[in-house]
Amino acid sequence: MNSLRYLRQGSAAVFIPLSSKFPVGPQLLLRKRYYATVTNADLYDVVVVGGGPAGLSLATSLRSSSVTAGLRVALVEGLDLAHARNWKSEPETYSNRVSSLTPGSVGFLTDIGAWKHVQRDRVQAYHGMQVWDGVSGSRIEFNWNSSASETIAYMTENSNLVHGLLSRISELGGVEIIDKTRVESISFGEDNGELDLRTWPVVEITGGRKLVARLLVGADGANSPVRTFAGIESRGWDYERHGVVATVKLEEGSRVGVEKTAYQRFLPTGPVALLPLPGDFATLVWSTTPQVAAKLKTLAPDEFSAMVNAAFRLSHVDIDYIKGLSEGIAGEVQWRERVSQFDYTRVPARVVGVQDKSVASFPLKMRHADSYIAERIALVGDAAHTVHPLAGQGLNQGIGDIQSLIETLEAAVQHGQDIGNSSLLPFVTPNISNIFSLANQGSILSLEPYYSAQYFKNDLMLGVVDKLHKLYSTTSAPVVALRSLGLSVVNTMGGLKSLIMKQAAGRR
Amino acid sequence: MILKRIAQLAGARTLFNGSFSALARPPPNYEGHIPLNPPERAILAIGNLIATLGETTATPYFIYRLRDVMLSSPTGRRILRDRPRITSKTLDMDQLRKLPDGTVGREYAAWLDKEGVSPDTRSQVRYIDDPECAYVMQRYRECHDFYHALTGLPVIVEGEIALKAFEFANTLIPMTGLSMFAAVRLKRGEQKRILTTYFPWAVRNGLLSKEVINIYWEEELETSVEALRERIGLEKPPDLRKIRKEERARKKAEIAARETLGPS
């Protein structure tokens, strides 16, 4: 009796999925007691807050994994997802919100069955990359062996991806998607004597309904309410730069027979990148000062195109001057292009048009949460980290989180752990541990593997990207000379380059 | 070889321009251009051809810097766009001589007449690869006589050195700095004057005034020198001729005094 009591209080909880699909006898037996005071409808194994690419990927992978398919999952999203669900693509029109997905990320999306729902003719793979110093002109070129022609990344519209994920979720069924609904508050449950929900987060949504979560996942973006509830600090800084995005049209047929290439030039104010979309289209990401971003947004289409062409062709001194002009930008750029020396084979095709209403901007930040996990809480994607877009790693990091979290949850379910447990210390779930705990001595640490797998990997990426931004934001001659030498040395070392490529591609 | 390799790696075309053998010289980038490789550049810089020295030492970095100075100014950009040349054909010297006293054009013409030179005596730039930078060098050379008009410094060795010091501080072209070593050839009294009066003036004004390379001289011919100096924030240097005259008078007086005292 004594030893039984010890186990009851000191052992790990047994994890029993709440879904009725889970065909385990004792669960049914248990349910009567379990739900004595809380209604069945209120309890979920996983509540995901946020219906962006990260949250939807998580919901999809939970349902597509045979191990976690038995979990009861709800997803709460403030916006109306009907728009994304009924997304109808218009040919020759591309969203300005485009992400670079590495082959590793696409592999995962394929595994969870979502990639086949993504419209592939709107996804552009690229095989080459040109990155150069806007002050010295030194350059690093990445090209997979043209024979092998391997893909560096896939440019994918976020709307296309979200649509694909939603299609996959409705194909799988079983995820309760609650959209057009805000999270009003998050609190902990109560101990009603029979059921101790004191460690279970309770999400109150618009209309007063309460969702009780065994595991609450914050996929709710950079200002994550879930993170705030968990009391996890997010640290970092603002770059005082804005990312200007736009969908642009390139000179027709200018690159026939040439493999699609991504271009990025490091200007002292920040990098400017032009990434390929299908056909003669491309997506622009230009990091620059908020003043210049505001100015770029006011430019007429032909002036905007001229500025983008200038950004890849003219000296940074020219660009600084021209962006201050109130008129005659196109003429000025034309003259400077004629007298400036640049290798036209190594700059992107000329921009000839900008898609209506596609110019937008957002502030650039670096943030990293102190932790990704707390008791019954996990953070994924932007809720956990925000990175400068210069390496195109934002969404890939988020998908990496999902991949790692799902593996962690699978392991926890397979070992009968309580999936919400983040703590090293044993804890007791409501009155049930005495029945099932015997087999689970010591298997307690269910979320920890997710944190340890992702945190340092992401921290390294954030750090490297941050240092790159800083290294290239100076025009100081000795620094420029050193960084140019470094870049060119790396450029001559094939082995190191393909290692970087593999790393960047997230190959598995 | 190693240097060449480093140059290639650094990819800094502004620092190490081109590497080719003298037998396979690339075609010229503009009329009169002679492409040079780094050893040739070094040899020409050492060989005492003043104009060549100016060009070869300006090529790494400095001429690009001066071009960027021009690119950052509306007037400088206009000059680069128009690429005006200062020659006896583009400037009507007779017309300049008729301008009122104290105007830039009149003073400029006066300098040339006094020296017995014409605007055409400036040599052609040959060894700078970038056509635009070659133009900047050409422009700098052709404007030199205007700097005399602007500062009022005479075309004697002492005045020339003072002006070079000002140009060095203002343009950072190395050649102008090297010219200052000519000061060792001066007499002791002149050296002292350069060091205590004119170098401080040159450094202060060279750094603080606006860049003279951005003055569109062709448009300032009728401007008064006074007004132009004020606009670019340049203070007039002490009148060298006057100082020298006074100095001479003082010396003469001393000698005279010694002579009247006689062998005591």
Image (cartoon, coloured by chain):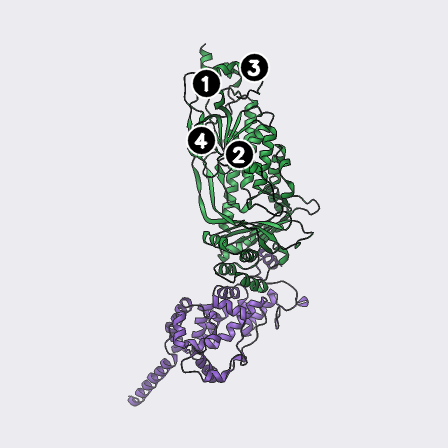
Q: Position of residue B121 (x, y in %)?
A: 54, 80
Which residue is label 2 attached to?
A: A55
Q: Amino acid at mark 1?
A: Pro
Amino acid on which disc 3 is placed = Gly
Q: Residues within 10 Å of mark 1 (few under 14, many from 20)?
A: some
Marks 1, 4 in one chain = yes
- Is the Cβ of the residue at disc 1 closer than 8 Å to that at disc 4? no
Residue pointed to by mark 3: A25
Residue corresponding to mark 4: A206
Q: Are marks 2 and 4 in contact (CB under 8 Å)?
A: no
Q: x%, y% of residue A75?
A: 51, 30
Badge 2 amino acid: Gly
What shade has chain B been given?
A: purple
Left or right: B180, with A84 as reference point: left
3D distance between C-alphas at marks 3 and 2: 32 Å
User: In the rendered image, which quarter contains the N terminus of chain A?
Assistant: top left
Hue used for the chain lettered A: green
On the question of residue B183 being in view, the answer is no
- Say yes or no: labels 3 and 2 on the same chain: yes
Disc 1 element = loop
Residue A430, numbered circle:
1
Same-chain status of marks 3 and 1: yes
Q: Amino acid at mark 4?
A: Thr
**Mark 1–mark 4 distance (CA, rounded to whole Å):** 28 Å
* Chain-order first, disc 3 or disc 1: 3
Q: Chain of mark 4?
A: A
Looking at the image, tell me whether mark 1 or mark 4 is earlier in sequence order. 4
Res A351 seen here: yes
* Residue A280 relative to residue A213: left or right: right
Marked residue chain, label 3 = A
> Residue at horizontal 53%, vertical 45%?
A389
Could you tell me residue A155's position as x and y percent? 60, 44
